[in-house]
């Protein structure tokens, strides 16, 4: 059995394989920014040749793949993430723009503020309110929610961040919003602040959830392609209704979900950084990689 480590960089994709006796082999392939899963599979092919195996046999003899990539980091730095909409408690849509009133150079009166990942027109208030202790002060208004979702739908949002006040104490309204989004915007990528970063301080929780929503679809596409490519080279993937058990249990529900597979405790790319993810082989009856999170 083999264990494989993969590091996808901007120029090269590096791979290392270790067998049960501790012997180590290495391979290097050119990275393919247009679809980085192609570079990964090319590297795996080269690594299989080092062991005198074809790729299918090599993957079937592998029980663990530890993987790191800069897909999320690049999407954030190059500002090539998804078109994100934000649903938040009415009157609080400017939290991510106001931040905490701080700036890097606090005495520079002419310092321009950073441009938010979600423009103000796509940050919409919803009539609801949860108190600091988790008690519901204002029930979630279905009409207000439906109107906000309809506006995001017309704006062409591919991803939605749901950020309600004090949802870390009571996530009921965010969960109801997810169900409404799944019904009214099928296929949209959904990030709930109560799952991405369930802790006090609204700016940190809202901002992190927005980043997750911004980079999540790109990472989901990459991981789906990479997982499908690996499963295409194994014997039993077609027998499953969802190849490779994909997607794993996510924090983002829906067809485009891929949360909790980039090494974060609750969600993919909470901070947009490059974090390791693990593909671990399921029982031998399946013979394909299953994505699983790992701290």
Image (cartoon, grey):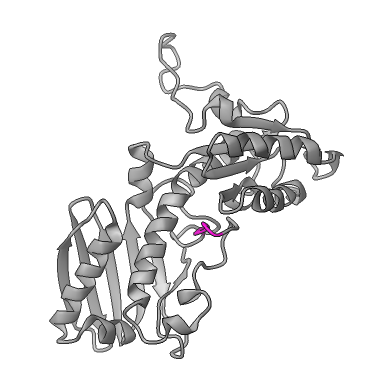
Camera-side residue of 19 and 240: 240
Q: Is residue 213 above or below residue 249?
A: above
Q: Could you tell whether 180 is left or right of 220 in the image?
A: right
Whether residue 163 is visible, yes or no, is yes
Q: Could you tell whether 277 is left or right of 213 in the image?
A: left
**Which residue is drawn at the image coordinates 73% and 40% (left, top)?**
146
**Residue 57 in picture, x, y percent from top left:** 27, 87
**Which residue is drawn at the image coordinates 33% and 37% (left, top)?**
78
Q: Main secondary structure of the magenta part?
A: loop
**Residue 141 in picture, x, y percent from top left:** 81, 38
**Which residue is drawn at the image coordinates 15% and 70% (left, top)?**
27
**Residue 47 in picture, x, y percent from top left:** 18, 76
Where, by quadrant of the figure, is residue 107 drawn? top left
Q: Could you tell whether 25 is left or right of 97 in the image?
A: left
Q: Is residue 214 above or below residue 9?
A: above
Stretch in magenta: 255-259
Whether 289 is among the magenta residues is: no
Q: Is residue 246 above or below residue 57?
A: above
* Count of residue discs: 0
Whether residue 276 is visible, yes or no, is no
Q: Is residue 232 above or below residue 77?
A: below
**Residue 89 in picture, x, y percent from top left:** 71, 34
Where, by quadrant of the figure, is residue 40 drawn? bottom left
Q: Residue furthest front?
A: 154
Camera-side residue of 285 and 76: 285
**Which residue is drawn at the image coordinates 30% and 88% (left, top)?**
1
């Amino acid at each position: 059995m083999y264990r494989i480590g993969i590091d996808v960089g901007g120029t090269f994709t590096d791979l290392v394989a270790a067998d049960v006796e501790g012997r180590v082999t290495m391979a290097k392939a050119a990275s393919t920014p247009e679809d980085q899963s192609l570079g990964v599979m090319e590297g795996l092919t080269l690594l299989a040749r080092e062991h005198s195996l074809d790729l299918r046999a090599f993957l079937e003899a592998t029980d663990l793949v530890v993987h790191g990539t800069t897909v999320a980091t690049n999407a954030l730095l190059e500002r090539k993430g998804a078109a994100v909409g934000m649903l938040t408690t009415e009157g609080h849509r400017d939290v991510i723009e106001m931040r905490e009133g701080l700036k890097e150079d606090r005495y520079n009166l002419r310092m321009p503020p950073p441009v938010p990942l979600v423009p103000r027109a796509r940050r919409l208030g919803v009539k609801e309110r949860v108190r600091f202790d988790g008690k519901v002060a204002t029930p979630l208004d279905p009409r207000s929610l439906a109107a906000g979702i309809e506006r995001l739908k017309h704006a062409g949002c591919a991803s939605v961040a749901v950020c309600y006040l004090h949802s870390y104490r009571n996530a009921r309204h965010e969960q109801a919003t997810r169900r409404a989004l799944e019904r009214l915007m099928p296929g949209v990528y959904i990030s709930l602040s109560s799952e991405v970063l369930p802790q006090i301080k609204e700016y940190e929780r809202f901002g992190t959830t927005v980043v997750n929503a911004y980079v999540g679809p790109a990472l989901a596409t990459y991981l789906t392609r990479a997982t499908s490519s690996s499963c295409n080279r194994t014997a039993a993937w077609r027998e499953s209704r969802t190849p490779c058990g994909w997607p794993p249990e996510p924090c983002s529900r829906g067809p485009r979900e891929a949360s909790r597979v980039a090494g974060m405790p609750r969600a993919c790319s909470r901070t947009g950084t490059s974090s390791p993810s693990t593909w671990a082989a399921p029982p031998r009856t399946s013979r394909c990689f299953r994505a699983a999170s790992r701290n």
